[in-house]
């Protein structure tokens, strides 16, 4: 027989055990919340991607195909190159991320000696939009990112001259747009997805990147640049023209996987 004192002791012990168990559950839940998104909101903040350093700019081509060839040549050499439409209407190529102007010049001269490039220009970090982020504000930077993305509309090309990697073109476009604005955005869509801060669907803003699971396997296989009003600019695939599509209906609404911000 258990007397009344023993019963009180057992009851107290049970209560303490229950309290201890609950505290572990709460701690575990809190830890999980700090590591994963809840309702599309990131609890644990990530470091912003770094600004791009000095960059080498080369070439001046009347059509995109020739710029693409130089981009492919530099990519085969091991450099993450990308081309764009310059304000003059000519296509130019950029590559590199150098800590100093001298480092960039040294690399450019080496490439000249090897016959890979001819004339070149060193782009300073303060010539890019990133450097004006604090003085002109986030809205300015976002508008510059969108403007850059729109400059690629109608262009048909494959980044780096390869079609071997799925998602290469779309992530190449995102990388080009961001690096032209001074953001050292990673090369692949998966790394881009991991580098940014999660944005709730209702709070996606101009210049954010939007990601898709086009394979239906729970991964990231496509990316575009959000331009506002439910639309985004992307490279649909190798050889296809860069275009605008909607997030609000159709195919891309069904495979939408989330948005990321880098500002």
Image: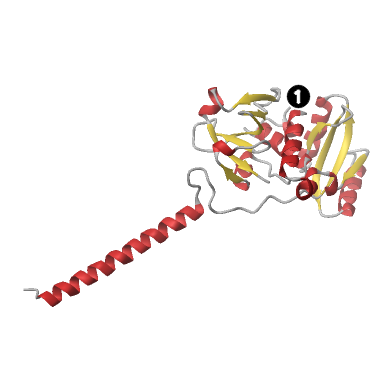
Seen at 88% across and 52% down, the residue is 101
Q: Is residue 142 above or below residue 133?
A: above
Position in image of residue 153 (x %, y %): 74, 25
Q: Residues within 10 Å of mark 1 (few under 14, many from 20)?
A: some
Identify the residue at the far left of this view. 1
Residue 193 horizontal side relative to residue 185, left or right: left
How many circles with numbers are drawn on the protein? Answer: 1
The percent coordinates of residue 245 (x first, y second) are 63, 24
Residue at the image point whose x is 68% and y is 26% from the top: 238
Q: Residue at x 23, y 71 (%)?
A: 13
Left or right: residue 144 compared with residue 169: right
**Which quarter of the rendered picture does the N terminus lie within?**
bottom left
Q: Which of the 4 image quadrants contains residue 90?
A: top right
Q: Secondary structure at mark 1?
A: loop
Nearer-the-camera pick, 248 or 158: 248
Choose between 11 and 29: the one closer to the eye. Answer: 11
Q: Quick check: 54 above or below 259? A: below
Indicate the position of residue 6 as horizontal and vertical percent values. 14, 75
Q: Can residue 106 be seen in the rendering of this structure?
A: yes
- Residue under numbered circle 1: 155
Q: How is the image coloured?
A: secondary structure
- Residue 258 appears in the figure: no
Quadrant hosting residue 162: top right
Q: Is residue 228 above or below residue 154?
A: below
Residue 254 point in image, percent of width and height: 51, 28
């Amino acid at each position: 027989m258990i007397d009344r004192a023993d019963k009180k002791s057992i009851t107290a012990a049970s209560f303490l055990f229950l309290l201890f168990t609950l505290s572990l559950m709460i701690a575990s839940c809190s830890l999980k919340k700090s590591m994963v998104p809840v309702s599309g909101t990131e609890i644990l903040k990530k470091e912003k991607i770094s600004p791009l350093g000095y960059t080498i700019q080369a070439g001046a081509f009347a059509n995109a195909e020739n710029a693409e060839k130089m981009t492919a040549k530099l990519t085969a050499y091991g450099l993450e190159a990308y081309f764009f439409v310059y304000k003059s209407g000519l296509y130019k190529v950029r590559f590199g991320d150098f800590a100093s102007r001298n480092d960039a010049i040294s690399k450019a001269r080496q490439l000249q000696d090897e016959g890979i490039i001819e004339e070149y220009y060193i782009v300073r970090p303060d010539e890019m939009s990133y450097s004006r982020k604090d003085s002109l504000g986030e809205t300015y930077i976002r508008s510059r990112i969108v403007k850059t993305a729109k400059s690629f509309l109608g262009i048909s090309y494959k980044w780096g001259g390869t079609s071997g990697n799925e998602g290469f073109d779309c992530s190449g476009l995102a990388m080009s747009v961001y690096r032209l604005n001074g953001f050292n955005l990673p090369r692949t869509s998966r790394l881009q997805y991991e580098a940014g801060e999660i944005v709730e669907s209702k709070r996606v803003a101009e210049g954010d990147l939007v990601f898709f699971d086009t394979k239906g396997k729970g991964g990231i296989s496509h990316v575009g640049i959000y331009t506002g009003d439910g639309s985004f600019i992307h490279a649909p695939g190798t050889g296809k023209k860069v275009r605008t599509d909607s997030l609000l209906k159709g195919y891309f609404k069904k495979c939408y996987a989330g948005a990321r911000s880098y500002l």
